[in-house]
Image (cartoon, grey):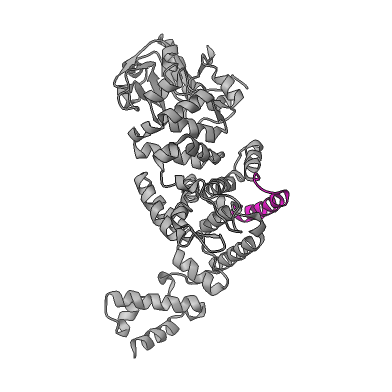
């Protein structure tokens, strides 16, 4: 692992300028970790022996972004670089924030207060890598380990409990044993953490290459603290020909499938894709594994063009959708006289439950609404005719292609013995959807060749009657798009009015 880091010019300039004034300065934390892993860091944070006032004296353009904690943002060519004074944290009163912060001139004291060894490294081109806690060794071993005593680190900041699992998911690393045990011991302290901070860590985890770490959330008891509605899914058996995993395992695999659709178009290395397959093929017979790989490739051929047009926000919404799509199955579970389990209306009740969960976790309204709609529709399979397809698109609204990603991810987490019939119907439905959308047929009221003013001129009263009449006309056009001509629609509207 290369410990030479090519620091960007502006960050290098800040370090050199501080050093020229007699201070120490290093890039630190996540940027050092990512650079050592061969990744491109999103941000370059700098730590220094200079106090905030001294930093402000050295540079002309600064912003007091977190001056009470020693952080000043130095602006360079329109980009901000956070420069933070070496510090010591005082006593933590709420398992999140230190009661007070004291500055120090000792880099070692600053690094020892950080969360994990892989985040406690510093670097500058003159000194090289400062790694007193063997962060490089843990990067090589693929290990998440607390700096110093794990119990103390989690006492200081309970959010680190989730950050440990999140880093494990993002990097594909294991959690060191004493750190893992300390996580279990401190999970209850998450009650002191804001829902917003929980959301940030959870979404980074579920939208990662190793989303199977949701199992770690469950095993450590974190899930019971942050998302108790999901815990009954683990161990909830599905005695049906359509499933070979319990509800919890099915959910985890569906989240992984969704993320794999995004990974397949990214620059993610082959090792992550190999780990994905290694996980999802577990629990299947040899024949089922071959079926799975066959239909995964077919699904990717359809999903790639869809994913190409999506954003990271879309990935988060879709990953959360998969995490919550079967959340109400345990509540809806029934067993018939043959011992077969059923989960009637789980998608309806689950969509309502997911809405409440995501609102509580402070997701924005767009994300909450879209996830709710995707969950409500995730089991929908009636796409047999073009008439039904047109009506479904009209009723569902925007984002219909994302629904098929959800259904692909869902089916791939079911019983491969039933893949052929399910996927062929989905592929056929998607082809119909594409044909309808590309043909530009009318699907919404605004697409009609008649409007509310036209109806008023025919004698319709202003108000709800106009909306009802337009929706009735849309229904006729969805049945037969050739009716979307003003003369024909006028005649239908006149007949409906009795004129």
Q: Does residue 38 sit above or below 453 in this rendering?
A: above
Residue in the picture at 36% in, 51% down: 356
| Location of residue 381 in the rendering, given as x and y in whole percent from the top left corner | 54, 65
Residue in the picture at 48% in, 81% down: 483
Write the start and end of the magenta stretch as one range: 281-304
Residue in the picture at 50% in, 42% down: 206
Which quadrant of the view contains residue 97? top left
Residue in the picture at 34% in, 20% down: 70
- 135 relative to 50 in the view: left or right: right
Of residues 181 and 270, the one nearer the viewer is 181
Looking at the rendering, in which quadrant would you find the N terminus? Answer: top right
Q: Does residue 180 sit above or below 91 in this rendering?
A: below
Which quadrant of the view contains residue 298? bottom right
Instruction: Specify the farthest residue to the left.
Output: 462
* Residue 131 visible to the viewer: yes
Q: Is residue 292 magenta?
A: yes
Looking at the rendering, in which quadrant would you find the C terminus? Answer: bottom left
- 25 relative to 431 in the view: left or right: left
């Amino acid at each position: 692992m290369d410990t030479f880091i090519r620091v960007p010019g502006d960050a290098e300039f800040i370090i050199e300028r501080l050093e020229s004034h007699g201070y120490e300065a290093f890039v630190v934390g996540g940027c050092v970790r990512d650079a050592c892993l061969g990744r491109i860091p999103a941000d370059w944070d700098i730590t220094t022996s200079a106090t905030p006032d001294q930093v402000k004296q050295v540079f002309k353009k600064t912003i007091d972004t977190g001056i009470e904690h020693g952080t000043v943002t130095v602006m360079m060519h329109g980009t901000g670089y956070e420069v933070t004074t070496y510090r010591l944290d005082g006593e933590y009163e709420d398992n999140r924030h230190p009661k007070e912060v004291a500055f120090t001139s000792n880099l070692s004291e600053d690094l020892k207060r950080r969360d994990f060894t892989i985040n406690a490294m510093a670097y500058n081109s003159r000194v090289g890598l400062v790694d007193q806690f063997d962060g490089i060794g843990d990067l090589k071993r693929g290990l998440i380990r607390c700096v110093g005593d794990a119990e103390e680190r989690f006492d200081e900041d309970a959010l680190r409990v989730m950050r440990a699992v999140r880093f494990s998911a993002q990097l594909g690393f294991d959690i060191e044993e004493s750190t893992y045990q300390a996580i279990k011991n401190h999970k209850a302290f998450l009650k002191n953490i804001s829902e917003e901070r929980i959301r940030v860590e959870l979404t980074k985890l579920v939208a990662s290459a190793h989303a199977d770490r949701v199992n770690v959330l469950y095993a450590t008891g974190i899930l019971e603290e942050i998302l108790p509605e999901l815990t009954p899914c683990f161990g909830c058996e599905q005695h049906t020909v359509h499933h070979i995993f319990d509800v919890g395992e099915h959910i985890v695999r569906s989240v992984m499938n969704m993320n794999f659709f995004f990974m397949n178009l990214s620059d993610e290395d082959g090792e992550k894709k190999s780990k994905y397959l290694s996980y999802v093929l577990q629990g299947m017979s040899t024949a089922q594994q071959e079926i799975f790989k066959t239909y995964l490739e077919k699904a990717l051929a359809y999903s790639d063009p869809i994913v190409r047009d999506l954003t990271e926000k879309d990935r988060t919404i879709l990953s959360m959708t998969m995490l919550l799509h079967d959340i109400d199955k345990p509540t809806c579970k029934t067993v018939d006289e043959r011992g077969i389990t059923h989960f009637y209306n789980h998608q309806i009740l689950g969509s309502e439950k997911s809405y409440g969960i995501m609102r509580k976790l402070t997701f924005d309204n767009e994300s909450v609404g879209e996830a709710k709609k995707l969950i409500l529709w995730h089991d929908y399979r009636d796409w047999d005719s073009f008439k039904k397809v047109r009506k479904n698109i009209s009723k569902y609204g925007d984002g219909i292609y994302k629904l098929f990603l959800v259904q692909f991810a869902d089916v791939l987490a079911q019983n491969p013995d039933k893949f052929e019939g399910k996927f062929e119907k989905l592929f056929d439905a998607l082809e119909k959807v594409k044909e309808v959308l590309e043909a530009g047929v009318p699907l919404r009221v605004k697409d009609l060749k008649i409007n509310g003013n036209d109806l008023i001129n025919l004698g319709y009263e202003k108000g709800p009657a106009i909306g009802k009449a337009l929706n009735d006309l849309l229904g006729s056009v969805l049945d037969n798009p050739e009716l979307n001509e003003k003369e024909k629609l006028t005649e239908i509207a006149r007949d409906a009015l009795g004129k």
